[in-house]
Image (spheres, rainbow, N blue to C red):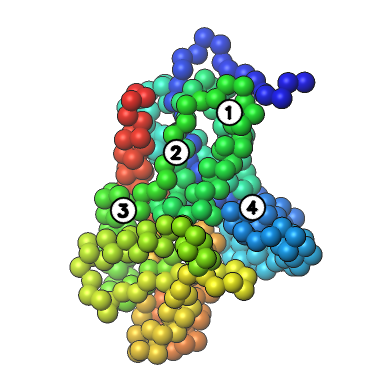
Amino acid sequence: MSYYRAVAQAEAAPDRIGVLLVNLGTPDSPSYFAVRRYLREFLGDRRVIDTSRLVWLPLLYGVVLPFRPVKTLRNYRKIWMRGGSPLLVYSKRLTEKIGVRLRDSLGDKVRVDLAMTYGNPSIAKVIKTLAEQNVRKLLVVPLYPQYCSSTTGSVFDRTSRVLQRWRWLPETRFVNDYFDDAGYIGALAARILEHWSEIGERSHLLFSYHGIPAVYVKEGDPYQSQALETTRLVVSQLGLAPDEYSHCYQSRFGSVVWLQPYTEDALKSLAARGVRRVTVVSPSFAVDCLETLQEVAIEYREKFEEFGGERLTLVPALNDDDRHAEFLTRIVQNRLQGWT
């Protein structure tokens, strides 16, 4: 049997361009074994937990996987939608809108699809499907505005792993980030203003980004600097004064030091200063998910009230908003220069 694999392609079909959008992933259902499978794949990725396998794997299989799924599935059940997890539902809708826009300009030359780094639909399955439709040029677009080794880097790893044993390889391009894209910044600012209009007030704006271990930044990860720049650009567009916003990081895991200040500590500090109402925006999440709908909108809201706050509201992620689809389509079109 040959080491390298052949991929069947459609006969008499034209060569096509594939656009692969990739998000983190989600369990197939809010059940114990589905969540356990997802966590095993996610937390087993060395990009996510960069600890000696001799130390981490016994902890993962002996401590984390037997017990953590119980808590996680309960949190998923609080936010689960009719079509699945919010991350999957919104990512699919966003992909469909981008697909419509690209087909309007490129017609049958383009195929647009969605994959997940962990869980389903997998990167391997979707790339194979694209190849079977004669996709000979592939643009991979991770749905992470800020580059991070744990997220964007994992997409690159998985994509490369899929292709490394193919007999024939598509010409491939990769979008690293779009943290300072004018369309992205404008869409974020507009989303915040719309949220304030809907709730009838402007309150202290807390930028809460997904955290990463601090050592990753020391070793060259640009995530923190890109997150700070996103905050700076949005603040500038909104015209906020220094005391009208804060910047922090959420979702830490384990006992190592992560980027600070932590969101929980920031909320506690704001309450101690007498800030009673807070608006939270999470720019690192392209679509709403467990970390926004449960961790921020439920868990952090309750904690803020315990600290003495009166009201915490979450700015919805860009999700399948038309502005989101439009600026991502423009980014894709720019990256396709020379292919079309």
Q: Is residue 7 above or below residue 318?
A: above
In which quadrant of the rendered view does residue 57 lie?
Answer: bottom right
Which of marks 1 and 2 precedes in the sequence?
1
Q: Which of marks 4 and 1 is in front?
A: 4
**Which residue is label 3 attached to?**
180
**Which residue is label 2 attached to?**
174
Q: Which of marks 3 and 1 is in front?
A: 3
Residues at badges 2 and 1 in contact (C-beta under 8 Å)?
no
Per the model, the C-alpha gap separating discs 3 and 1 is 32 Å
Per the model, the C-alpha gap separating discs 4 and 1 is 24 Å
Crowdedness of circle 4 by 10 Å Cα count: few (<14), some, many (20+)?
some
Q: Residue furthest front?
A: 219
Name the mark on residue 45.
Answer: 4
Q: Is residue 305 above or below residue 3?
A: below
Per the model, the C-alpha gap separating discs 2 and 3 is 17 Å
- Residue 324 seen in render: yes
Q: Which residue lies furthest to the top in this view?
A: 12
**Which residue is label 1 attached to?**
129
Which of marks 1 and 3 precedes in the sequence?
1
Q: What element carries label 2?
A: strand
| Nearer-the-camera pick, 72 or 8 | 8
Q: Which residue is drawn at 34% across and 40% down?
A: 331
Residues at badges 4 and 1 in contact (C-beta under 8 Å)?
no
Crowdedness of circle 2 by 10 Å Cα count: few (<14), some, many (20+)?
some
Q: Which residue is drawn at 62% across and 59% down?
A: 49
Which of marks 3 and 4 precedes in the sequence?
4
Which of marks 2 and 4 precedes in the sequence?
4
Crowdedness of circle 3 by 10 Å Cα count: few (<14), some, many (20+)?
some
Q: Is residue 104 left or right of residue 49?
A: left
